Image (cartoon, helix red, strand yellow):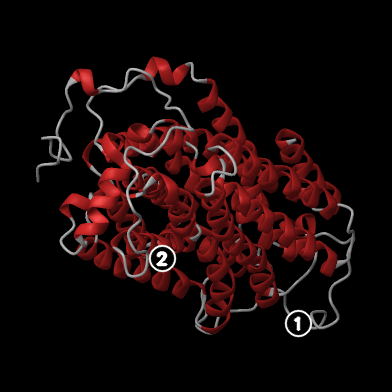
Amino acid sequence: MALGDGYSINSDPEEDCEETDLLLNNDMEPAVKEAAAPQLCSARYSLALLMFFGFAVVYGLRVNLSVAMVAMVNDTESHQSLNRSTGHECPAHSDNRNSSKKTDGPDGSPRYPWSPETQGMLLGAFFFGYLVTQIPGGYLAGRFGGRIFLGGGVLGTAALTLLTPLAAQLGVSWLFALRALEGFGEGVTFPAMMAMWARWAPPLERSRLMTISGAGASFGAFVAFPVTGVICESLGWPAVFYICGGAGCLWAVFWFVLVSDDPRTHPRISEPEKNYIINSIGSQGSAHGWSIPLVSMMFSVPLWAIIICQMCSNWSYYTLLTSLPTYMDTVLHFDLQQNSFLSALPYLGAWLFSVLSGVAADHLLEREVMSVTAVRKIFTLAGLVLPAAFLVAVGYTRCSSALAVTCLTLSTTIGGASAAGVFINQIDIAPRYAGFLLGITNTFGTIPGVLSPIAVGYLAKDVSIHNFLVLRFKSDLEVV
């Protein structure tokens, strides 16, 4: 379909229309001062809601193994590993002393003698694949539109998740390869989201639209942790992967039926909303050509600042995302059901706080209280430094389970503020290349996802509060 400037959404702009400089002026005015279209039942907020549920599914597919691992490991056959990998500093809870920590599934689900190192490798396998497709996914989504890549990434990952019980039965190598392939599929999802919002999000609504959609990740983790624990105890751990995979396939059907790449091609959008989006974004929302300003990106100081902040933030985030159930199990000695519910609490706070941060950020911009640059810096600072302080405090809670859970919850909750800061900054500095830039920053940001579970597995050979504190200090000092 032809666009207003004579191009289709997938056509090459003329060379003289390409941005010669990577960065835009963050404090520039929108292309046209257009009266805002209604938000209720609008196409852009419907897209944000569908993305919200999509990323909830994405994170459900990502974290299900973290909790299911507690039920998949055979304590009897790995007795030696268990003796080495269970902390004895804190006593077991009184209601857990006479019960098995790993509840057998009702269907006789298989258990595997995996050492802590093996478990760490399996939890980190996802991120090996996730690293590979970030940049290609961002480039292709910016060139051809994000709809097919976001929907296809979720659908492919969901289909592979259905094969998890079979892969586990075939052996560790098969499961490692499968998890890496799942990461390969999911790697395109966040860059595709950014590429779509470059065409759909008016500048003064970017914070709230992107935090609403991105908050689905925290909501997905919040739901996945307790639901996975309940499913493991009631239906057996294989059912976790069948249910999560089925949910992803179902979501993909709605996505491909309801979503369009561009407001100009959306069949159900109102004319006032279409004009509002197009006039607000202007030429920034057009697809980029085959060539991109790589040299400008390579020497862009703001881009490197985003990369460093995202890497440091993700080290703490991925450590908790993949290893919090292990900490709850081996150090604080919660049973599977308690473990899954308490592991979910931090992500409930992060979900709510990230959405509120997006609304607050847009409010500051609409009222012209601060510039875009100042708003992004303030929310980034709040989302990095304060969570680091609470994570450090966890190491000093000793055996106070309530205090440890409180500090972990506050840390992850306040970390949601960065959703309105560094995690959407790419669309501010270069909207046309936003998907590609997110691919770059997410590639670096995924490195902690690879290293963190492996580091936890290594430290878990002699689990203690001290070792978990060492791991957290590494990330927290980097952040500070």
Q: Is residue 130 visible?
A: yes
Where is residue 127? Give x, y as percent. Answer: 49, 44
Q: Marks 1/2: CA distance? A: 36 Å
Dot 2, crowdedness within 10 Å: few (<14), some or many (≥20)? many
Kindly identify which residue carries mark 2: 53
Where is residue 311? Give x, y as percent. Answer: 59, 36
What amino acid is found at the position of numbered circle 2 in the picture?
Phe
Quadrant assignment, res 10:
top left
Tell me if 156 is positioned left or right of 359 in this view. Answer: left
Q: Residue at x 57, y 43 (%)?
A: 421
Tell me if 459 is positioned left or right of 378 in this view. Answer: right
Q: Is residue 462 visible?
A: no
Q: Residue at x 73, y 65 (%)?
A: 329
What amino acid is found at the position of numbered circle 1 in the picture?
Ser
- In the image, 44 versus 396, the foreground residue is 44
Tell me if 65 is positioned left or right of 417 in this view. Answer: left
In the figure, 24 relative to 357: above or below? above
Where is residue 440? Give x, y as percent. Answer: 44, 32
Q: Secondary structure at mark 2?
A: helix
Kindly identify which residue carries mark 1: 99
Q: Residue at x 41, y 47 (%)?
A: 190
- In the image, 367 versus 429, the foreground residue is 367
Quadrant assignment, res 114:
bottom right
> Is label 1 or label 2 in front?
2
Where is residue 133? Give x, y as percent. Answer: 37, 39
Which mark identifies residue 293?
Answer: none
